[in-house]
């Protein structure tokens, strides 16, 4: 069975992008003509996911409005003969069943996922982190789902990162299984240099068994005093119930200023509305640098 439900944790405070994120949720920052959260939802939809739960907090109502209808705007566009624009506006609300739940306290990623337990029920589900936007020929979450479906196992999406950077992520103890698939034996969140297992880190994509919920429920706070998803995944990994896929695609960390700007430039170059003009502009600009 292929997964039909996804959880998108988007309750972080966005402190790496201040002062912008004081009033605008980081997930609503534009990547060209769409907010970054739309790219995440589009990836899930392209992989066949129908129900999406976005975990928000009290300062992120703009996201809920974005996935709702906007009758006044749509009517005005239709009256002006702008059917294509009206359809664009309508599509954001109709592309999936997008639901919301608020994480009432900022207690960590593991706690955010735990708030989704009733939505998830008893089937495997996807997790897509709101900060990690992917450019990939095949939806990254779909690449994980294929392996999860074939192996009946939780699967995380990994890539090798530099040893200078691995302390920002997590590090996985892995052994090669086949092709781009690894068995995961253990993992550590935000490793110190002496704790690094391998250069492989999870980059924002997971297909998880609901067995993760009782583990999360009984977990003590980990790195940074927060309930860490990685600590719960490590329990599944040590039980031999986890695989990793080295996914094909490029990941942007849109929660950081540099990653966000790279994402805007590279994805705008692929946008039919502005790609060619932007390419000409960048080539000219590069000559003056
Ligand atoms: C989170 C996860 C971490 C993962 C990273 C990138 O960290 O806790 O394991 O490697 O996302 O997807 P954060 O970026 O919230 O510090």
Image: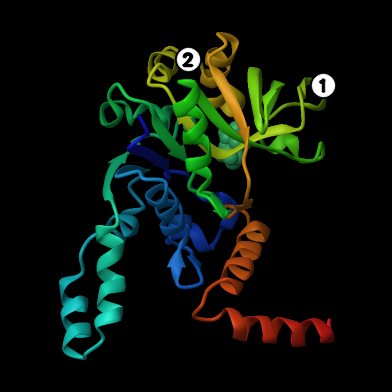
Q: Quadrant of the C terminus?
A: bottom right
Distance, label 2 to label 1, CA atoms, is 24 Å
**Residue at left offset 67%, top offset 31%:** 179
Q: Quick one: label 1, few (<14), some, or many (20+) residues within 10 Å?
A: few
Q: Residue furthest bottom?
A: 80
Q: Residue furthest top?
A: 239
Can you see residue 121?
yes
Answer with the quarter of the image where residue 165 lies. Answer: top right
Q: Quick one: label 2, few (<14), some, or many (20+) residues within 10 Å?
A: some
Contact check, label 2 and label 1, Cβ < 8 Å: no
Residue at which label 2 appears: 219
Residue at which label 1 appears: 194
Question: Upstream in the sequence, badge 2 or badge 1?
Answer: 1
Report if the beta carbon of the residue with label 2 is closer than 8 angstroms to ligand 1.
no
Measured along the vertical axis of the image, is residue 142 above or below residue 152? below
Q: Which mark is residue 90?
A: none
Measured along the vertical axis of the image, is residue 264 above or below residue 80? above
| Displayed-image quarter of ligand 1 | top right
Q: Nearer the viewer, residue 282 or 83?
A: 83
Answer with the quarter of the image where residue 218 lies. Answer: top left
**Residue at left offset 36%, top offset 34%:** 3
Image position, residue 211 (x, y; %): 40, 16
């Amino acid at each position: 069975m292929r997964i039909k439900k996804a959880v998108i944790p988007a309750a972080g405070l966005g402190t790496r992008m201040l002062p912008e994120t004081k009033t605008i949720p980081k997930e609503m920052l534009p990547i060209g003509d769409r907010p970054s959260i739309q790219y995440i939802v589009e990836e899930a939809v392209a992989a066949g996911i129908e129900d999406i739960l976005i975990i928000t907090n009290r300062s992120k109502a703009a996201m809920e409005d974005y996935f709702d209808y906007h009758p006044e705007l749509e009517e005005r566009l239709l009256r002006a003969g702008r059917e294509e624009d009206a359809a664009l506006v309508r599509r954001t609300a109709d592309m999936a069943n997008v639901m919301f739940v608020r994480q009432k306290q900022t207690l960590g990623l593991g706690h955010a996922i735990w708030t989704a337990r009733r939505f998830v029920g008893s089937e495997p589900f996807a997790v897509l982190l709101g900060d990690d936007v992917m450019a990939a020929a095949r939806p990254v979450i779909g690449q994980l789902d294929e392996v999860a479906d074939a192996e009946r196992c939780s699967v995380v999406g990994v890539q090798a990162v530099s040893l200078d950077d691995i302390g920002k992520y997590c590090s996985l103890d892995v052994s090669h299984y086949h092709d781009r698939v690894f068995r995961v034996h253990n993992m550590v969140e935000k490793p110190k240099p002496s704790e690094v297992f391998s250069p492989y880190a999870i980059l924002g994509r997971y297909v998880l068994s609901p067995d993760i919920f009782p583990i999360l429920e009984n977990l003590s706070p980990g790195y940074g005093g927060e309930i860490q998803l990685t600590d719960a995944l490590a329990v599944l990994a040590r039980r031999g119930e986890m695989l990793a896929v080295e996914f094909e695609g490029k990941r942007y960390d849109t929660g950081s200023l540099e990653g966000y700007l790279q994402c805007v430039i590279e994805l705008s170059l692929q946008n039919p509305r502005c790609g060619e003009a932007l390419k000409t502009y960048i080539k000219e600009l590069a000559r003056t640098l």
